[in-house]
Image (spheres, grey):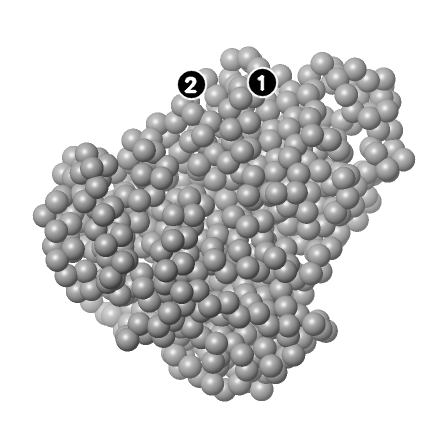
């Protein structure tokens, strides 16, 4: 029999497995299944849930609203499930095990566990074999069930064994306990809200806002981070007091009475190994580790995998390594925008030769400025938090086109942070005066605290929170040098809420999964142990350049660092300036009172004169945040 409220036994459709009631000690009245719930597996998606602390039934109307807001993350199927005070929701993007059997939420009646899961466990086959050796029987073929069996076998420590990107929630029906986890690099998002009555979680903040009852007042500490660190607000904070996010490499246990426990299960060590390696040995070790990371992300899919080929070293090297792994007929995708006098808007001249060398099926998309401005509100609507990186809209528009051809792409995000590719790293390394945070801020902070105090409503200014946090992170033990500490900070904290979040949000908006080999756990740990000079030499990413020799055109290897350009959002003029002026002069902005008007007028009077230390538009920073608030609150 299939799983309904009144059952004598529970069957897994198509699997030939039945659970008699004697193996099913949990009262059947605890279950509600909708949308063809099956005991199987699923992968990329959107997840959400609610746990009531008063043992009352969850608010299914709120769950419905959360699921509606997550639909774009998982367009292939929807599933819901509840047990007493707990309800789970899931939106599925089908990548592995494409049958009906792979729907979520997943329940294991024998173990008394249920799960919703977003991500991919790349080593699930090895874990499955180990669990089978310990007597566990499997009724599905993918990685979701591995999470359930691993949690049953190892408890909270199961996450230490997972290699991949993941955000998941497990409900323990017998002990009435909710367990949530997020991957080491924060590739998959997990937001939550909590009050005296309930705990809710979701894959984006908008789903929590749609559920209702969230304190949306501005968190002054988070606001300070946002305007200092290029819109990065490190976990657990967000701009709203009532919305938090689970930090990377952490688990959160929520008891039925509302007690919570946050635990960290991994830290990145940025110190030298005991045994010295030669330069050649380091480069070969990186080559082998990166190739394994690329191959690992290729194998776990039952659909074609493409590459976002920007024309830079990182994505081009992924194409070369995929060819080295034997891939033929690879699909590659490049987007370009209109030029400005100061900057080109496309990198086709670099991506085309790479595509030609490896005979990929190459797709080029050119986006005019008019479309950038017209489609910008859509991109902003899919930002779980406001993002000022000019390439957010680029990824959104590119993902729309790519999703018509593939469901999975590999992308080069993380290479610059892991292997020291940004121009500010050598400048920081040359600094010798002041504390670590002083040496960092001179080349990275968007604005110093005194400028921030002139910009923001004085009622929200209560201290230099960002300097205090960054000092704490840079001074933490486990980094041999200042640059080791800087790169560790970038990889474990700053990248999470800038390029990584941006890629996840903008690709999942089109039901497209992005995989990031440069953030493979083993590769990141190897690179963190590498001497900084091997990363920063010759302008940065020295090891990657050495690996690329002979595999890529020299013009791609030796070109200056590119930044996925959308020049119209950097050199603010014409319709884009009018758009930002309208936002900042709007009644909503003035009544919100977030900004001091004198500062706004200064930027509007000369928008291209006010750039951050890493060349971002300060005017765009203000306009984007206000626009995001209007789209989400007003």
Pointer 1 local density, CA inside 10 Å: few below 14, some 14–19, many at least 20: some
Q: Is residue 555 above or below residue 181?
A: below
Q: Which mark sits nearer the N-terminus, 1 or 2?
A: 1
Q: Residue at x 28, y 35 (%)?
A: 218
For residue 21, what is the image quadrant? top right
Q: Estimate the x, y position of residue 337 in percent, counting from the top left.
A: 41, 68
Compare residues 343 and 295 and report the one nearer the observer: 343
Q: Estimate the x, y position of residue 38 in percent, counting from the top left.
A: 75, 33
Query: Could one spot residue 351 in this view of the protein?
Result: yes
For residue 135, what is the image quadrant? top right
Q: Residue at x 64, y 79 (%)?
A: 358
Rendered image: mark on residue 85? 1
For residue 607, what is the image quadrant? bottom left
Compare residues 345 and 185 and report the one nearer the observer: 345
According to the image, label 2 marks what residue?
196
In terms of secondary structure, where does tag 2 sit? loop
Image quarter where the C terminus lies is top left
Q: Is residue 525 above or below residue 244?
A: below
Query: Could one spot residue 179 in this view of the protein?
Result: no
Residue furthest to the right in view is 16
């Amino acid at each position: 029999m299939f799983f309904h409220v009144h059952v004598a036994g529970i069957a897994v459709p198509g699997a030939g497995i039945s659970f008699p009631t004697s193996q099913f000690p949990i009262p059947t009245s605890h279950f509600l299944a909708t949308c063809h719930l099956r005991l199987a597996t699923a992968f990329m998606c959107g997840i959400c849930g609610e746990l009531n602390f008063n043992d009352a039934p969850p608010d299914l109307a709120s769950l419905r609203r959360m699921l509606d807001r997550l639909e774009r993350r998982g367009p292939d199927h929807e599933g819901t499930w509840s047990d007493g005070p707990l309800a789970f929701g899931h939106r599925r993007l089908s990548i592995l095990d494409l049958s009906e059997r792979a729907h979520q939420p997943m329940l294991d009646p024998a173990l008394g566990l249920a799960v919703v899961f977003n991500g991919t466990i790349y080593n699930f086959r090895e874990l499955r074999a180990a669990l089978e050796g310990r007597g566990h029987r499997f009724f599905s073929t993918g990685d979701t069930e591995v999470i359930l069996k691993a949690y049953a076998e190892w408890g909270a420590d199961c996450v230490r064994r997972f290699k991949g990107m993941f955000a998941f929630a497990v409900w323990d029906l017998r002990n009435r306990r909710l367990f949530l986890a997020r991957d080491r690099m924060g590739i998959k998002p997990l937001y939550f809200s909590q009050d005296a009555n309930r705990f809710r979680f979701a894959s984006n903040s908008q789903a929590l806002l749609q559920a209702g009852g969230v304190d949306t007042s501005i968190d002054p500490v988070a606001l300070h981070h946002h305007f200092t660190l290029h819109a990065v607000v490190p976990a657990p904070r967000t701009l709203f007091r009532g919305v938090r996010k689970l930090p990377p490499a952490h688990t959160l246990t929520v008891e039925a009475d509302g007690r919570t426990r946050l635990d960290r299960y991994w830290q990145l060590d940025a110190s030298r190994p005991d045994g010295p390696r030669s330069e050649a040995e380091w480069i070969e070790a990186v080559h082998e580790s990166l190739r394994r990371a690329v191959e690992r992300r290729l194998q776990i899919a039952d659909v074609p995998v493409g590459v976002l080929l920007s024309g830079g070293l990182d994505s081009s090297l992924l194409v070369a390594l995929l060819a080295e792994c034997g891939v033929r007929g690879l699909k590659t995708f490049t987007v370009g925008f209109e030029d400005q006098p100061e900057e080109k808007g496309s990198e086709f001249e670099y991506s085309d030769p790479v595509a030609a060398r490896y005979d990929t099926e190459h797709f080029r998309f050119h986006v005019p400025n008019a479309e950038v401005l017209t489609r910008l509100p859509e991109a902003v609507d899919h930002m779980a938090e406001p993002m000022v990186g000019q390439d957010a809209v680029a990824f959104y528009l590119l993902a729309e086109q790519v999703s018509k051809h593939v469901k999975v792409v590999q992308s080069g995000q993380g290479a610059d942070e892991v292997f020291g590719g940004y121009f500010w790293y050598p400048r920081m390394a040359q600094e010798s005066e002041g504390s670590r945070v002083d040496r960092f801020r001179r080349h990275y902070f968007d604005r110093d605290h005194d400028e921030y105090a002139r910009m923001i409503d004085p009622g929200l200014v209560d201290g230099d929170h960002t300097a205090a946090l960054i000092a704490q992170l840079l001074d933490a033990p486990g980094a041999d040098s200042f640059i080791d500490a800087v790169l560790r900070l970038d990889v474990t904290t700053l990248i999470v809420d800038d390029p990584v979040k941006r890629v996840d949000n903008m690709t999942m908006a089109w039901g497209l999964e992005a995989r990031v080999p440069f953030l493979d756990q083993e590769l990141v740990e190897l690179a963190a142990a590498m001497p900084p000079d091997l990363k920063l030499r010759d302008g940065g990413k020295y090891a990657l350049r050495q690996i690329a020799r002979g595999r890529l055109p020299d013009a791609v290897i030796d070109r200056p660092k590119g930044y996925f350009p959308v020049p119209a959002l950097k050199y603010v003029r014409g319709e884009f300036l009018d758009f930002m002026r309208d936002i900042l002069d709007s009644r909503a902005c003035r009544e919100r009172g977030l900004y001091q008007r004198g500062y706004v007028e200064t930027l509007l009077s000369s928008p291209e004169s006010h750039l951050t230390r890493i060349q971002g538009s300060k005017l765009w920073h203000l306009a984007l945040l206000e626009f995001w608030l209007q789209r989400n609150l007003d």
